[in-house]
Amino acid sequence: MTNRKLVNIHVLGITDRDGEREEIETVSDGLMETETETGRVHLFYKEISENEGEELNVSVLFVFDPSGNAREGRILRSGIVKSEMLFIGDSETECIYRTPLGELGFEILTTSIDVSLNENGLKARLTYKLSSGGQLLSDAEVRIEANG
């Protein structure tokens, strides 16, 4: 069974590079779908591309194991900028970031995926190390709250 509801989504991206902290915040209305049979929660919303000023479609997917713990997170952006970030606990994954000027490749080493669900929505925290070509770029985290 799939449950759908309108939610307000708040996303805070935090990077720490050589002691310099940067925060990027997005607030948007969106949709939350909960699939009880598959153990998946999907968020859909729109954001404005930071550098291009264009609207992006964003999809966030969390997959849970049978005991209810999040085992995977995925953030997909599509529009003038495209990216797919895959978060799997204690694993390194590759990400391609496509812009009108070209592609950039990154590695994501996920250190934790914490997701909690309640009757109002979802609260998630993804922590990871971002690198390129094996060179550490920053420690990072994404905090996501969806409330409806």
Image (cartoon, helix red, strand yellow):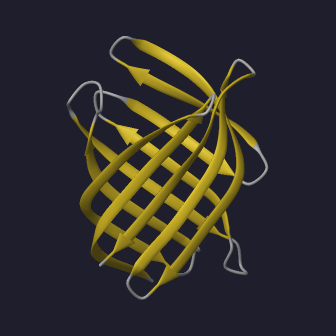
Question: What residue occupies the far front of the structure in this picture?
Answer: 19
Q: Residue at x 54, y 39 (%)?
A: 15
Tell which of 131 and 36 is nearer to you: 131
Position of the N terminus by quadrant: bottom left
Tell which of 96 and 146 is nearer to you: 146
Q: Residue at x 46, y 46 (%)?
A: 13
User: In this rendering, would 18 be left or right of 23?
Assistant: right
Q: Residue at x 60, y 45 (%)?
A: 86
Residue 21: image location, x then y, percent: 52, 38
Q: In the figure, 124 relative to 99: above or below?
A: below
Residue 98: image location, x then y, percent: 43, 23
Tell which of 136 and 102 is nearer to you: 136
Question: What residue occupies the far top of the structure in this picture?
Answer: 101
Q: Quadrant of residue 63?
A: bottom right
User: In this rendering, would 14 be left or right of 56?
Assistant: right
Residue 61: image location, x then y, percent: 50, 58
Q: In the figure, 104 relative to 88: above or below?
A: above
- The number of callouts visible is 0
Q: Quadrant of residue 42?
A: bottom left
Q: In the figure, 81 relative to 125: above or below?
A: above
Q: In the figure, 9 relative to 90: above or below?
A: below
Residue 75: image location, x then y, percent: 48, 48
Q: Quadrant of residue 9?
A: bottom left
Q: Residue at x 28, y 56 (%)?
A: 27
User: In this rendering, would 59 be left or right of 62?
Assistant: left
Question: What residue occupies the far bottom of the structure in this picture?
Answer: 119
Position of the C terminus by quadrant: bottom left
Question: What residue occupies the far right of the structure in this picture?
Answer: 90
